[in-house]
Image (cartoon, grey):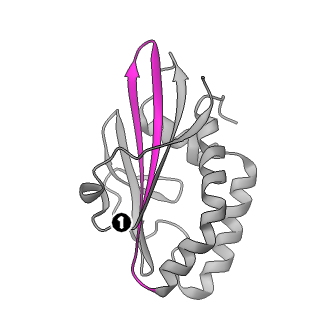
């Protein structure tokens, strides 16, 4: 059904995207006949997501600052620019990989667009590799919110930008 976000089995080569990832999940939304590139889908997710996600991200940035964690993609290599705070690592019209490495964990977001002209879908895959106790603790703390946030962000792919 168009606009319905559902969890799916991840279908990325985790070793190629983020070797050693300890966490991986994926969500998919059907977009019908809409034509959208992976970059446009990512922009709609990250920059035009629900406002409550913006509030959660600001709160996260306040809470992690004392621990020296990144609050944006500053200083990270961004060969294809930034989308929000995420450096774009690689990009084709069908796939965009964004993310960064930090002292506590490495994170990647993979946005894939697939299907034919009559039935297209966008899949968002999250991969995380932790480095230490802080990374494992951080991942544990954000997990209750992760699925809710991703579903909310992906719902914006088929909606008009705000």
Judge left or right: residue 89 versus residue 141: left
Report the side of 120 relative to 152 (left or right): left
Name the spot of residue 4 as percent of width and height, x first.
62, 31
| Quadrant of the rendering where the C terminus is positioned | top right
Q: How many marks?
A: 1
Q: Which residues are magenta?
A: 107-132
Q: Residue furthest top?
A: 118
Q: Magenta stretch: dominant SS?
A: strand
Residue 5 location, x and y as percent? 60, 36
In the picture shown, does residue 11 fall above or below 135? above
Disc 1 crowd rating (10 Å Cα; few below 14, some 14-19, many 20+) is some
| Residue 154 coordinates in the image, percent (x, y) | 59, 40
Residue 49 sits in quarter: top right
Q: Quadrant of the N terminus?
A: top right
- Identify whether 83 is placed above or below 142: above
For the point 66% across and 45% down, the residue is 152
Q: Residue at x 65, y 33 (%)?
A: 161
Q: Which residue is mark 1?
A: 21
Q: At 63% across and 36% down in the image, what residue appears?
A: 156
**Is residue 128 in the magenta section?**
yes
Residue 69 in percent (x, y) is at: 52, 79
Query: SS for tag 1?
Result: loop
Q: Quadrant of residue 141?
A: bottom right
Look at the image and say whether residue 115 sits in the magenta stretch: yes
* Residue occupying the point 39% across, 80% down: 131
Viewer-nearest residue: 116 or 156: 116
| Residue at the farthest left position | 16
Q: Report whether 123 appears left or right of 71.
A: left
């Amino acid at each position: 059904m168009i606009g319905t976000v559902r969890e799916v089995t991840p279908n990325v080569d985790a070793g190629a995207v983020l070797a050693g990832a300890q966490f991986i999940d994926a969500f998919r939304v059907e977009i019908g006949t809409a034509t959208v590139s992976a970059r446009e889908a990512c922009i709609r997710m990250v920059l035009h997501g629900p406002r409550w996600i913006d509030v959660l991200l600001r709160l996260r940035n306040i809470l992690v600052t004392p621990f020296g964690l990144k609050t944006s993609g500053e200083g990270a290599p961004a060969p294809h620019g930034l989308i929000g705070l995420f450096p774009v690592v690689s990009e084709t019209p069908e796939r965009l990989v964004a993310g960064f490495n930090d002292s506590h964990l490495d994170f990647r977001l993979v946005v894939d667009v697939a299907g034919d002209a009559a039935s297209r879908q966008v899949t968002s895959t999250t991969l995380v590799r932790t480095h230490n106790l802080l990374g494992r603790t951080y991942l544990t703390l954000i997990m209750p919110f992760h699925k809710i946030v991703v579903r909310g962000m992906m719902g914006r792919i088929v909606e008009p930008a705000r």
